[in-house]
Image: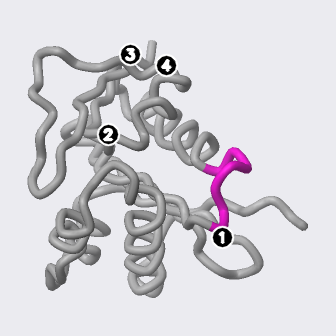
Amino acid sequence: MRAPSIRLARPADLAAIATVHAASVRALCAGHYSPQAIEQWLAPSPGLYDRMLRSSTVYVAERAGRVVAFAAVRLATREVRAMYVSPDATGGGLGLRLMQRVERVARAFGAAELRLAATLNAVGFYERLGWRRDPRDAGTRPPQRCVAMRKRLT
């Protein structure tokens, strides 16, 4: 099977991005958050993905023409806003490839550091990529608890 390709997201990808987000949260976060917290997290927010596409640089990973992952970085604030992989596409290095792309673009934009709020299930993944917990930030972002993290890019 061919490796997924990574490209900039476009408006036609919004429904697929929403599907990946919901599937990823329901499957991969289930052991770390209550069912109620997950459903609150995924409650409809009209225009959420459209706003993300307008305010961030968003990449999607496609396999056989299907979006299987996405990542969003807001370069103006040096913040990774999202990184989700479909449950059936985990474990193959796709998250690593997306984060490498985001970090490379941020460096090219002049960022010396990035920050993010990691879900509890993803903290180890980010730590393996060189991200560190940020003790200056409480790391909460309703409706779920998150861990604030930073990474120097230089």
Query: Image check: 54 left or right of 94?
Result: left
- Mark 4 highlights which residue? 130
Q: Earlier in the sequence, mark 3 or mark 2?
A: 2
12 inside magenta stretch: no
Q: CA distance from mark 4 to mark 3?
A: 9 Å
- Mark 3 highlights which residue? 152
State whether residue 124 is above or below residue 56.
Answer: above
- Say what amino acid the circle numbered 4 marks: Gly
Q: CA distance from mark 1 to mark 4?
A: 25 Å
- Region in magenta: 88-94
> Which residue does the image show at 15% across and 79% down from the upper left?
45
Q: CA distance from mark 3 to mark 2?
A: 16 Å
State whether residue 153 is above or below residue 64.
Answer: above
Q: CA distance from mark 1 to mark 3?
A: 28 Å
Query: Image check: 6 left or right of 135?
Result: right
Q: Are marks 1 and 3 in contact (CB under 8 Å)?
A: no
- Mark 1 highlights which residue? 62
> Which residue does the image show at 33% across and 40% down from the upper left?
120
How crowded is the residue under tag 3: few (<14 C-alpha within 10 Å), some, or many (20+)? Answer: some
SS under mark 3: strand
- Mark 2 highlights which residue? 118
How crowded is the residue under tag 2: few (<14 C-alpha within 10 Å), some, or many (20+)? Answer: many
- Say what amino acid the circle numbered 3 marks: Arg
Q: What mark, if any, has residue 71 been given in the picture?
A: none
Q: Nearer the viewer, residue 154 or 26?
A: 26
